[in-house]
Amino acid sequence: MKTVAIVTDSTAYLSDDMLSEYDISMIPLNVVFGNESFLEEKEIGVDDFFEKIRRENELPKTSQPSIGSFIETYEKLAKTHEEIITITLSSGISGTFQSAYSAGGMVEGVDVHVFDSEISCMVQGFYVLEAARMAQEGYSSDRILERLNEMKNQGMHAYFLVHDLSNLHRGGRLNAAQLVVGNLLQIKPVLTFEDKQIVPYEKIRTRKKALNKILSLFDESAKDGAPIKATVIYANNKEEAVQLKSELEAKYSNVEIILSYFGPVIATHLGEGSLGLGWYRT
């Protein structure tokens, strides 16, 4: 019997190859256009998502997975595993953590541990990949969770920029005062996660200056040569992301970079053209 199974939600945006290689179970969040609901990464991919927004000129809503979807996955995994570790996006921006936790108490025959990444996208994915690697190597759930908390305490960094704040405000992820100030000043804010919430890190007037600010923060971590795993994340602006990845790889030999994307759920709130950089020191 395998001991520990790893589960995550779709907002980690792990590739099918990663999910398969590390035997990770993925539970999708929902994207809702009018009366139609789609499971992201399963029923709607990011390309179809942006095409649908342009065609229908409608910003969708998003919702967390049902408790039942977690129960179904847990019950299946309980047949071959003794324990489950579920790693979710930040509980400050979604009820996914609570759904995963509630489901864990309803399943018999397996111990379920739920870890709040307090972040999202491929930075959340870093936690998932580390947990899955350790599970494959036979580590206990206690040791895996200890390692995840070590990573969190050492610092998981994520900074991103958006064209405007309106999507975040309409989705309830930014308050009205922050929206008004941002729009009046026509700023390109650098955003980050703080206390599980998406918050403005610094208000900057141009996209170029905002990106340079993120790169200066990255340089503070990378310049001493310590090994770093990083991700460049994009929203329908792949060319810009590929260029940034290439520039970072050329400058820092100590950095391993994964190219990733803002999928339908997160892109709903950030908007097309968003760009992110996340990293941690290994």
Image (cartoon, rainbow, N blue to C red):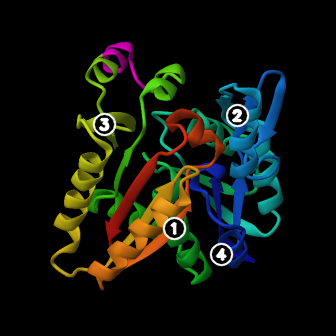
Residue drawn at point x = 47 percent, y = 24 percent? 166
Q: Position of residue 100 (x, y in %)?
A: 64, 43
Position of residue 15 in the picture relative to residue 224 (left or right): right
Numbered disc 3: secondary structure: loop
The answer to whether any part of residue 240 appears in the image is yes
Whole-Å distance between the Cαs marked 4 and 3?
A: 36 Å
Q: Position of residue 65 (x, y in %)?
A: 71, 38
Asked if the residue under mark 3 is in contact with the one under mark 1, i.e. CB atoms within 8 Å, the reply is: no
Badge nearest the viewer, 2 or 1: 2
Name the residue beneath numbered marker 3. Answer: 189
Numbered disc 4: secondary structure: loop
Asked if the residue under mark 3 is in contact with the one under mark 2, i.e. CB atoms within 8 Å, the reply is: no
Badge nearest the viewer, 1 or 4: 1
Closest to the observer, 79 or 157: 157
**In the image, residue 233 lies in the stretch drawn in magenta:** no
Name the residue beneath numbered marker 4. Answer: 22
Whole-Å distance between the Cαs marked 2 and 3?
A: 24 Å
Position of residue 42 in the picture relative to residue 104 (left or right): right
Reading the chain from its start, which is encountered first: label 2 or label 3?
2
Name the residue beneath numbered marker 2. Answer: 53
Q: Position of residue 107 (x, y in %)?
A: 75, 46
Numbered disc 2: secondary structure: helix
Give the extent of the magenta segment.
174-180
Disc 4 marks a residue whose amino acid type is Tyr
Reading the chain from its start, which is encountered first: label 4 or label 2?
4
Whole-Å distance between the Cαs marked 1 and 3?
A: 22 Å
Closest to the observer, 143 or 176: 176
Reading the chain from its start, which is encountered first: label 1 or label 3?
3
Residue drawn at point x = 64 percent, y = 50 percent? 9
